[in-house]
Image (cartoon, helix red, strand yellow):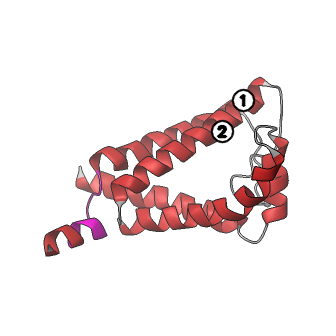
Amino acid sequence: MNIVVLIVRVGLGAVFIVAGGAKIGHAAYFAAQIAAFHLLPQPVIGPMALLLPFLEVLLGGYLVIGLYARLAGWIAAIQLLIFAVAIASAVVRGMTISCGCFGPDDQTVTSWPEAGRDVLLALAALVVALRGPGMLALDRRIASST
């Protein structure tokens, strides 16, 4: 099981690093995509568009190296479920908008498969949260040195 957790942890971490990295430097574009969902108050959108990409890269880094792996898994699962709910709410409201998931070059629009993808990624994050940290995790090295 440790190898499975390692693969899931590193794969999920890579997804977060790529998704966050693609949005860094494109805050105005990302803010417009967040606003298009009509779910958040305007004063929250700007700071969220600036901070969320860095949070995603940081979270991805923690997952890849296995530092605070279980906590990172929980945070990732919650974040991905929030994304899934936002996408599902847009689909239910008949909105076909860019999800903004992977930056300005991502042409993916809100759909049930996109919401499902985020739910599946959230389940993968739960594997890390519940079974982590897996092999080659910094958490294991720290625990064995104490």
Judge from the rendering whether residue 126 lies leftward or rightward of residue 107; answer left or right.
left
Residue identifier under label 1:
89
Secondary structure found at label 2? helix
- The image quadrant where one finds the C terminus is bottom left
Tell me what residue is drawn at x 78 percent, y 48 percent: 34
Query: Pointers 1 and 2 in contact (CB under 8 A)?
Result: no
Position of 81 relative to 59 (above/below): above
Taking the spot 58% from the left edge, 61% from the top edge, the residue there is: 56
Mark 2: amino acid: Glu
Q: Residue at x 22, y 66 (%)?
A: 140
From where the camera sits, is residue 136 visible?
no
How far is the residue under mark 1 from the one under mark 2? 12 Å
Residue 24 is inside the magenta segment = no
Residue 135: x and y in percent read 25, 62
Q: Which label number is shown at residue 36?
A: none
Task: Find disc 2 in the rendering and name its residue.
Answer: 114
Could you tell whether 118 is left or right of 23 in the image?
left
Quarter location, residue 67: bottom left
Q: Give the quarter of the image for residue 84.
A: top right
At x 35% / y 50%, what residue is drawn? Answer: 128
| Residue in front for this viewpoint, 72 or 122 | 72
Q: Secondary structure at mark 1?
A: helix
* Residue 101 picture location, percent across and down: 69, 52
Q: Which residues are magenta?
A: 132-141
Q: Main secondary structure of the magenta part?
A: loop
